[in-house]
Amino acid sequence: MTTPRWDPRRLNAVAADLPEGVTPPGTRGRILVAALSLFAEYGFHGTSIRDIAAGIGINSATLYGHYPSKEHILAALVLIGHEELHHRMQQAVVDTDADPVAQVAALVRAQVLAHTDFPLLALVANQELHALSPERAAPALALREQSRDLALRVLRRGVQLQVFDVADITLAAIAISSMGVRVANWFGPDQPYTRDQVADAFADFALRLTGATLPARRRDPGEPR
Amino acid sequence: MTTPRWDPRRLNAVAADLPEGVTPPGTRGRILVAALSLFAEYGFHGTSIRDIAAGIGINSATLYGHYPSKEHILAALVLIGHEELHHRMQQAVVDTDADPVAQVAALVRAQVLAHTDFPLLALVANQELHALSPERAAPALALREQSRDLALRVLRRGVQLQVFDVADITLAAIAISSMGVRVANWFGPDQPYTRDQVADAFADFALRLTGATLPARRRDPGEPR
DNA sequence: GTCTATACAAAGATAGAC
DNA sequence: GTCTATCTTTGTATAGAC
C-alpha cells in the first residue's frame, strides 16, 4: 500500500490517540501513533514500514533507529491497549464497594469507556494480536486472562450471594464482554450516542443479563408487568 | 508467508467448511476452501496467492484460471458468509409465529448457530470485509443492512406491543448482535459447550436484555425474588 | 486446466555517509 | 538521528507450452 486505495471503512473513528503517559517522547511516539492509525485501518499485514514512515514524514530506514522491526511496533501497541483496559477494570473494582451489582456495572462501564476513548487502540489490540509471535503476544494474553478472571470473580460472588441468577458464569462473562469489545467497531462521530450513554446502556444490559433485580425504569409509572 | 510461522491462535476451530450447495465444483471450490482456512488464520493480507495454491497442491498460476485476482476469492467468501447469515435469519422469522419473544429467540439462535456451524466463514466475512474495494464489499454490506433491519423490526414491534422494555432498540440490537458475532472467535473444540447450549444461553441472554417477561427458571422452585 | 518460466512491483531490513 | 542507496525476499500477475 502506497496510497490509500479507498476510504477507510473498517471503523468509525477519527484521531489516533494513545492513553496519557504511555506515549514515548519524540519520534518513537510519533511512530507509534502513525502505526496505530494505519494498523487499525488496514491491518498489520496491510501496512508497510514505508507507509508508517510516510505518515510522519520520515524515511523508512529511520524507523529502525527506534524499533528493531515492524512486529515490535505492533507488540508495543497491543501491550498498551491491554494494559489500559486491565488498568481501568482493576480501578473500577477498587473504586466500587462490595455490591456485586455495582461491581458489574463498574466493570462494564470501564470496558465500554476504554473502547470509546481509544477505539483504534482497542481494535488493534484485539484484532491484530494474532499477527504477533507467541512470545511477543504472551504479555498481552496474560493481561487479558487477568481481566477475564476479575469479571468471573465478580460474577461468581454475585451468584453465591444470590444477587445474580445465571446458570453459567463463563457464558455470561463471554456475552457481556462481547458487547463491550465490539464497541470499538461502531462507536464514533457518525452515530448519535455519547460515551456515557453507551456505558450506561450496556451496564444496564449486563445487569439484566445476570438476572439482577433492578429498580424499575423507563416504563409509565404504575404500569404492571 | 511460506511456512506457518507459529501455531494458529486466531480462532478455536478445525475444518474449513462452506455451507452446502454454495461450494463451486472442482478446483474452484477447493481454492475457496483453502483460502477460507488461510484468510481466517492469517488474514487476507497475511496470505499470499502462493499459500492458497500450495494448500491444495496446485501451482499459483493455476489459480488465475479460476479467479481473476486474490480479491475476487475474498469477495466470494465474504458474500457467501453474509448470504448464509441473512438466509438463516430470514428463515428463523418465517418459521416462527408472531410472538416477539419467540422471534427474538429464533433470530439469536439463528445468528449463533450460523457462527458455530461456520466459524471460519463468519470470521472472514466480518473481519476481512474491509480489505475489499467498496464495489466488491457492497453486496455483503447490503445483506448486512437487511439483517440488521430484520432484527430492528422485531424489536420495535415488541416494544410497541409492550412485550419488551427497551429504552433504545438500536443499542439493544447492537448489544445482542455483538454477542453473536463474537461466537466465531471462541467457539470450538477447546471449550465444553455444544452449539445448542450456546444458542439457548444467548437467546436467553438476549431476552433478558430486552426486559421480556420470562418463565422463572434455574432457581430453586418457590424461592422468592 | 495445469504447468514452467518470468516479469515487475513492493516488502522488510541493512550499510554507511552526514 | 536521519538520510541515500541498496540487498534480498516475497508478492501479484502474465505468457506461452503441454
Image: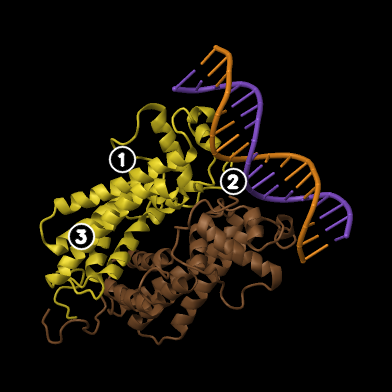
Chain colours: A yellow, B brown, C orange, D purple
On what subunit does the disc labeled 2 rest?
Answer: A
Q: Is there any visible trace of residue B150 in the rendered image? A: no
Q: Nearer the viewer, residue B24 or B62?
A: B62
Q: Which residue is mark 1?
A: A19
Please rate how many residues cluster around mark 3, counting C-alpha atoms within 10 Å: few if below 14, some from 14 to 19, many from 20. many
Q: Quadrant of the N terminus of chain A?
A: top right
Crowd around label 2: few <14 · some 14–19 · many ≥20 (10 Å): few
Residue highlighted by disc 3: A105
Say which chain tag 1 marks. Answer: A
Residue A79, position as x, y percentages in the image: 35, 44
- Badge 2 marks a residue whose secondary structure is loop
> Residue placed at 56% from the left, 51% from the top?
B45
Q: Quadrant of residue B197?
A: bottom left
Q: Are marks 3 and 2 in contact (CB under 8 Å)?
A: no
CB under 8 Å between discs 2 and 1: no
Query: Residue flagged by tag 1: what amino acid is it?
Result: Pro
Which badge, 2 or 1, is on the more N-terminal residue?
A: 2
Which label sits on residue A5?
A: 2
**Residue at 44% of width from left, 66% of height from top?**
B184
Q: Give how far across and how far down residue B71 sits, in percent.
A: 63, 56
